[in-house]
Image (cartoon, grey):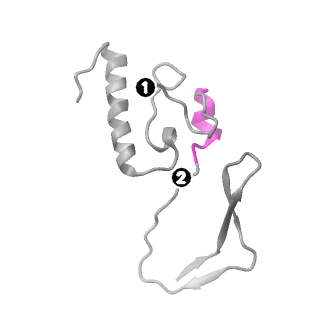
Amino acid sequence: ALHGVRLEWAPGEDGRMQMTEIPGSEFVEPVDLVLLALGFLGPERPGMVEQLGVELTDRGNVAADENKMTSVPGIFTAGDMTRGQSLIVWAIAEGRDAARGIDRYLMGETSLP
């Protein structure tokens, strides 16, 4: 059985959407299989993001230049960390862009497609 609670979304003090549980909305659903499709709420600030000291955008994502390098030389980012919640095809494309940026950073040029 799946045990759940209903949620509602509303803008928080910082303008970003935040979820809160709806009191008394608990439910149990009989199921044979559960597939998780998890959303992305943004980079976790405590931990690596703070330790590295990378700059964040106004939306709280990791800022990057056209080569996908962050404000810390040699540290690169792509996908949801940079763009925010988006489609996997964007993450794949940005991962390739980051690979070219890393190659250029390490080798001085890139021949990656």
The percent coordinates of residue 50 (x first, y second) are 63, 32
Q: Nearer the viewer, residue 45 or 91?
A: 91
Quarter where residue 59 is shown: top right
Dot in front, 2 or 1 = 1
Q: Nearer the viewer, residue 76 or 52?
A: 76
Vertical side of 109 occupied by 5: above or below: below
Magenta stretch, residue numbers: 42-53
Circle 2 crowding by C-alpha within 10 Å: few under 14, some 14–19, many from 20: few
Residue 49 belongs to the span the image colors magenta: yes
Q: Secondary structure at mark 1?
A: loop
Query: Mark 1 highlights which residue?
Result: 66
Q: Secondary structure at mark 2?
A: loop
What's the residue at 67%, 80% (across, down)? Answer: 26
Q: Which circle marks residue 40 in the picture?
A: 2
* Sequence-earlier tag: 2 or 1: 2
What's the residue at 61%, 30% (across, down)? Answer: 51
Quarter where residue 60 is shown: top right
The percent coordinates of residue 40 (x first, y second) are 53, 52
Q: Which amino acid lies under the numbered mark 2 shown in the image of this protein?
A: Phe
Vertical side of 26 occupied by 71: above or below: above
Distance of mark 2 from mark 1, alpha carbons?
Answer: 23 Å
Q: Which amino acid lies under the numbered mark 1 shown in the image of this protein?
A: Glu
Quarter where residue 74 is shown: top left
The percent coordinates of residue 109 (x first, y second) are 29, 15
**Relative side of 48 to 23, left or right:** left
